[in-house]
Image (cartoon, rainbow, N blue to C red):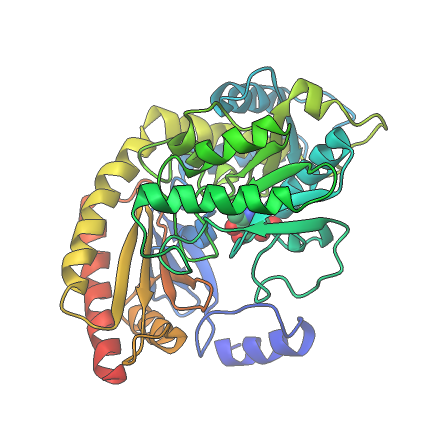
């Protein structure tokens, strides 16, 4: 069966809104290290790490061996029974989270983790009012779309939550874009205070991505959420940090994204998913015990924390820490950022190259300087041709997203940067 035939069958049976990359979508059949192969045998350097899911490396022996050993013993039991991998992984995540007296609840996705965090925060605070950031993305459940601040990714307004959106997540555009970091922070705090001043009754929580992921890898100045924290704490409002994309050292300087905003203490709740399972479905929420235990009804997640995924998560986290992949993300990501900035400097099609660690965004514009999703698609197609997979996103779909496995080598970074440079030049040539 050709990719074209498979694509036709996919379209006939899957939802029309299910996103697919490329004019001629790809079927990927296997991977190793930072590379993947398609069904025809063509090899690609994977600069999107699956979708930030392959955190350490494709087919990492430590993880695949842990998975197959556990699969050979028992695939699933449910959280009604004890599981040593689950307990150990929870202990390690609790200790790493920075949240005092932390408890961990495992889910199967980032959406479900945010859903659980919102359930906890709204129950604890007895309020269904929440604050979220403009341009945010938190998943596709009924409550997660209700805190997603862009209608492109949040196609319904019928949320169980009352959401108040505030400024600050997008640094590069919007009414405060021209301000210095200090003035930007002050303006966003004033906006938050103004919104709260106009709101009747309790507000449960603020949910925010430290670096907006689907939003195009855009980060506020360091310290913004610490400044928010001061305002929130005065009113007892909880801070939920969504670390689905930013966790596990991806941003290089910090293990969690919130640590760039740590002056006024850690968040109250933290959600994670994507990379921890290296492709296995592991998500979860961490919260102080008094918040986690505010739910009174008995509950389980049938598949959350299932033994095979817990074994994968534990092996993956052990590898990440033992090989200092956060340090690698900082070093190799720093080199890649420099290379891409130098490549982009003469190209009008590139408005900005930004990011930290191995979470780099390249924002593209058309001849008139307006956001160009067309340019982003051109770059993706050219890069794919040349053997490089990258992501895209951003409010207008005009940002390239680069997020390779955290074990990326300097040589691979150079190779990917060469391909991207050429793809950007070709897009520049086509756009004019
Ligand atoms: N939160 C953030 C920041 C995300 O980027 C995503 C997915 O892209 C989610 C939540 C939802 O995670 P999942 O797709 O695993 O449900």
- Judge by depth and name the residue closer to the eye, 420 or 84: 420
Q: Which residue is drawn at 61% across and 73% down?
A: 10
Name the quadrant containing residue 366.
bottom left
Residue 414, image x, y percentages: 18, 53
Residue 88, image x, y percentages: 57, 19
- Judge by depth and name the residue closer to the eye, 197 or 405: 197
Q: Which residue is drawn at 43% across and 26% down?
A: 318
In the picture shown, does residue 144 fall above or below 117? below
In the picture shown, does residue 290 fall above or below 324? above
- Judge by depth and name the residue closer to the eye, 385 or 335: 335
Quadrant into which the C terminus falls: bottom left
Compared across the picture, whether 35 is left or right of 150 comes to left
Q: Residue at x 68, y 54 (%)?
A: 146
- Judge by depth and name the residue closer to the eye, 281 or 308: 281
Work out which residue is located at the far top of the displayed protein and give it.
Answer: 101
How many discs appear?
0
Residue 240, image x, y percentages: 58, 36
Question: Does residue 391 appear anywhere in the picture?
Answer: yes
Q: Which residue is drawn at 57% across and 67% down?
A: 152
Residue 301, image x, y percentages: 75, 36
Question: Does residue 245 appear anywhere in the picture?
Answer: no
Name the quadrant containing residue 286.
top right
In the picture shown, does residue 237 fall above or below 359? above
């Amino acid at each position: 069966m050709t990719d074209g035939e498979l694509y036709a069958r996919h379209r006939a049976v899957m939802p029309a809104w299910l996103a697919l990359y490329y004019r001629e979508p790809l079927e990927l059949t296997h991977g190793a290290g930072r590379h993947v192969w398609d069904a025809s045998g063509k090899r690609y350097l994977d600069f999107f790490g699956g979708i930030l899911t392959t955190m350490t490396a494709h087919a990492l022996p430590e993880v695949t061996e842990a998975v197959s050993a556990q699969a050979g013993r028992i695939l699933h039991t449910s959280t009604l029974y004890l599981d040593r991998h689950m307990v150990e992984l929870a202990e390690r995540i609790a200790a790493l989270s920075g949240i005092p007296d932390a408890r961990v609840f495992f889910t199967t996705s980032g959406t479900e983790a945010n859903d659980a965090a919102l359930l906890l925060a709204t129950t604890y605070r007895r309020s269904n009012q929440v604050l979220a950031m403009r341009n945010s993305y938190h998943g596709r459940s009924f409550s997660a779309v209700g805190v997603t601040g862009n209608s492109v990714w949040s196609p319904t307004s019928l949320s169980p939550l009352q959401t108040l959106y505030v400024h600050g997540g997008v640094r590069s555009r919007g009414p405060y874009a021209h301000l210095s970091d200090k003035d930007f922070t002050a303006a966003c705090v004033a906006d938050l205070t103004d919104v709260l001043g106009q709101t009747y009754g309790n507000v449960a929580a603020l949910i925010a991505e430290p670096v907006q992921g689907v939003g195009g890898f855009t980060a506020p100045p360091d310290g913004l959420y610490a400044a928010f924290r001061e305002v929130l704490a005065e009113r007892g409002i909880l801070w939920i940090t969504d670390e689905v994309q930013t966790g596990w050292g991806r941003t290089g300087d910090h293990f969690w994204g919130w640590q760039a905003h740590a002056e006024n203490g850690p968040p109250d709740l933290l959600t994670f998913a994507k990379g921890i399972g290296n492709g296995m479905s592991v998500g979860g929420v961490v919260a102080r015990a008094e918040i986690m235990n505010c739910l009174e009804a008995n509950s389980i997640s049938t598949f959350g924390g299932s033994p095979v995924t817990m074994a994968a998560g534990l092996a993956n986290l052990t590898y990440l820490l033992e090989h200092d992949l956060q340090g690698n993300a900082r070093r190799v990501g720093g080199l890649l950022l420099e290379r891409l900035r130098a490549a982009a400097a003469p190209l009008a099609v590139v408005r900005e190259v930004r990011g930290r660690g191995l979470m780099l965004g390249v924002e593209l514009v058309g001849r008139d300087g307006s956001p160009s999703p067309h340019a982003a698609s051109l770059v993706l197609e050219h890069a794919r041709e040349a053997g490089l997979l990258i992501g895209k996103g951003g409010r207008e779909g005009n940002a390239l997203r680069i997020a390779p496995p955290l074990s990326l080598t300097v040589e691979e970074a150079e190779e990917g940067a060469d391909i991207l440079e050429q793809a950007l030049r070709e897009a520049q040539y086509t756009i004019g």
